[in-house]
Image (spheres, helix red, strand yellow):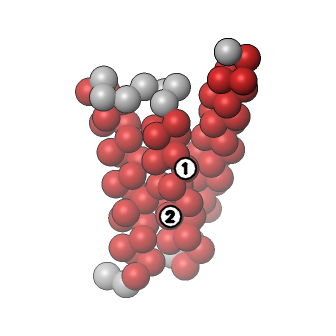
Amino acid sequence: MDIFQIIGFLGMLCIVGAYFLLQLGKINAENLAYQYINLAGAILLIISLLVHFNLGSFLIEVFWIFITIFGIFKIYKQRIKR
C-alpha cells in the first residue's frame, strides 16, 4: 500500500464517518462539521485518484466537492440572514 492509497483510505473514512455520524443523529446536514468532513474526504480521495486514476470515481468526487461547497455556502447564507 503506497501513500496515495493511504490518503484515499483516509478520505473514505472521512466520508463514511460523517455519514455514520449523520445517521446516529450526532450531527446534521446543516452542521458545518459535517460539510467540512465531507469536503476533506473528497479532497483526499481526489489526491489519491490523481495517482490511481479511475474516471468514474474521480467524477463522483468532483461532484461531491461542488455539492459540499454549495452546502457550505447555503449554511453561511442562512447564518447571515439571522
Q: Can the viewer see residue 19 in this picture?
A: yes
The amino acid pointed to by label 2 is Leu
Q: Which mark is residue 39?
A: 1
Q: Which residue is mark 2?
A: 44
Residue 40 rendering spot, x and y as whole percentages = 51, 55
Give above or below for 50 relative to 54: below
Chain-order first, disc 1 or disc 2 = 1
Q: Secondary structure at mark 1?
A: helix
Relative to the observer, which residue lies in front, 20 or 32? Answer: 32
For marks 1 and 2, give the CA distance. Answer: 9 Å
Give me the residue at 30% from left, 36% from top: 20
Residue 25 rendering spot, x and y as whole percentages = 30, 23
Give above or below for 53 relative to 65: below
Q: Secondary structure at mark 2?
A: helix
Residue 54 rendering spot, x and y as whole percentages = 55, 66
Relative to the observer, which residue lies in front, 55 or 36? Answer: 36
Q: Can the viewer see residue 57 in this picture?
A: no
Q: Considering the image in quadrants, where does the N terminus appear?
A: bottom left
Residue sticking out furthest to the bottom: 2
Q: Considering the image in quadrants, where does the C terminus appear?
A: top right
Q: Residues within 10 Å of mark 2 (few under 14, many from 20)?
A: many
